[in-house]
Image (cartoon, grey):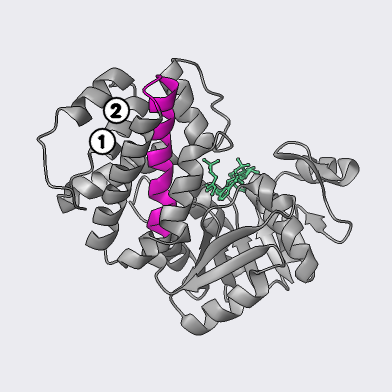
Amino acid sequence: MIGVMGAGAFGTALAISLTGNGPVTLWARDRTHIDEMRIAGENARRLPGTALPDTLRLSADIDELQHATIVLLAVPMQKLRTVLTEYAPNLAGKTLVACCKGVELETLQGPVQVITETVPDAVAAILTGPGFAHDIAKGLPTAMTLACADALAGGALQDRLSTANLRLYRTTDTIGSELGGALKNVMAIACGAAMGAGLGESARAALMTRGYAEMQRMAQAVGARAETLSGLSGFGDLTLTCTSEQSRNARFGLSIGRGEDFDASVTVEGAATAQAVQARARALQIDMPITDAVCGLTNGQLRVDQAMNNLLSRPLKEEKC
Ligand SMILES: NC(=O)C1=CN([C@@H]2O[C@H](COP(=O)(O)OP(=O)(O)OC[C@H]3O[C@@H](n4cnc5c(N)ncnc54)[C@H](O)[C@@H]3O)[C@@H](O)[C@H]2O)C=CC1
Ligand SMILES: O=C(CO)COP(=O)(O)O
């Protein structure tokens, strides 16, 4: 049995998709939400419009994941440690697959390291890459990355979690995979802000490309493989997120560019991640000007015109990572 913790958009979409492979239990901490989903036959709060399969088990009782060998962790990055710490006794010895994208603000760690610290005897993996919850829930064709440092366990997970429409590629590079997914959200905020402020598609292409150079710089400084960043979890997800208004990070950026308010209850991973990455980049003396710009935009210290001016007035340089 596969367990999914977190009945948000992504957890629900993965749970729907995986029911074709065998028994799945979707767990949420909020019993009222579970009852609502049982009555409505859909997750109206987070994934309206897609029916939940009859075979999908819904539960607010963590003991129902007792027989799950694999548990997907589909909660926001900044909540991952709290959830894992609370339920560590229930999760010991299982294969835990992070489905979140980001860097923890307090520790500057990614999801795999957070799993390893909180549930030391678990096998830790991450599922990341270009895929919107709504697309996956509808069964549209999607390809993503499954990263696990243990190659054997990663191969087994790839088999268990791939479906007819969700094609997983495996890697042992967990650091590169999680950084790609975390950093693309920062770049999506930058791209959204540029589009919202009317700076144009050429500016967006420049931000995506130089943003990708920043992603490569940071990833390689912390031991990731360059090829991982050029794959689905890096370049693939950067492309999707920076060019689609389905992305909440891009929409958040758009609202900044347009000077509009944004619903604070929407999960936007890139804002906290930008601050965490900036702190890590400073400690490692890595130049990340677009990340700096996003920090300034999201903490209200910079307007879009000031942020763009900072980027444009940097010394001219040779094009490289
Ligand atoms: N929505 C999407 O298209 C995709 C999302 N992701 C990633 O998945 C992660 C989750 O995102 P979504 O599901 O979209 O967000 P969401 O906002 O739809 O859902 C988050 C869920 O986490 C639950 N949650 C929050 N704190 C919790 C806690 N302490 N204990 C238990 N549950 C808690 C919330 O109740 C909510 O149901 C993010 O890191 C996101 O980047 C990755 C790929 C696609
Ligand atoms: O990560 C995603 C698609 O791969 C979803 O992006 P948002 O979190 O910006 O909506």
* Residue 185 is one of the magenta-drawn residues: yes
Image label count: 2
Horizontal and vertical percent for residue 301? 28, 21
Residue at 34%, 52% in the rendered image: 107
| Most common SS among magenta residues | helix
Quadrant where the N terminus is found in the figure: bottom right
Is disc 2 placed on a helix, strand or loop? helix
Amino acid carrying label 1: it is Asp
| Image vertical order of residue 112 relative to residue 240, above or below | below
Amino acid carrying label 2: it is Gly
Q: CA distance from mark 2 to mark 1?
A: 6 Å
Q: Which residues are magenta?
A: 178-200
Nearer to me, 175 or 80 = 175
Instruction: Please report contact status of discs 2 and 1: CB closer than 8 Å, yes or no.
Output: yes
| Image vertical order of residue 151 relative to residue 221, above or below | below
Residue at 59%, 74% in the rendered image: 158
Q: Quadrant of residue 4?
A: bottom right
Q: Residue furthest front?
A: 202
Horizontal and vertical percent for residue 290? 28, 37
Q: Residues within 10 Å of mark 1 (few under 14, many from 20)?
A: many
Q: Is residue 229 left or right of residue 222?
A: right
Q: Quadrant of residue 117?
A: bottom left
Mark 2 lies on residue: 296
Horizontal and vertical percent for residue 267? 55, 37
Residue 292's disc is 1
Nearer to me, 231 or 9 = 231
The answer to whether residue 51 of the structure is visible from this angle is yes
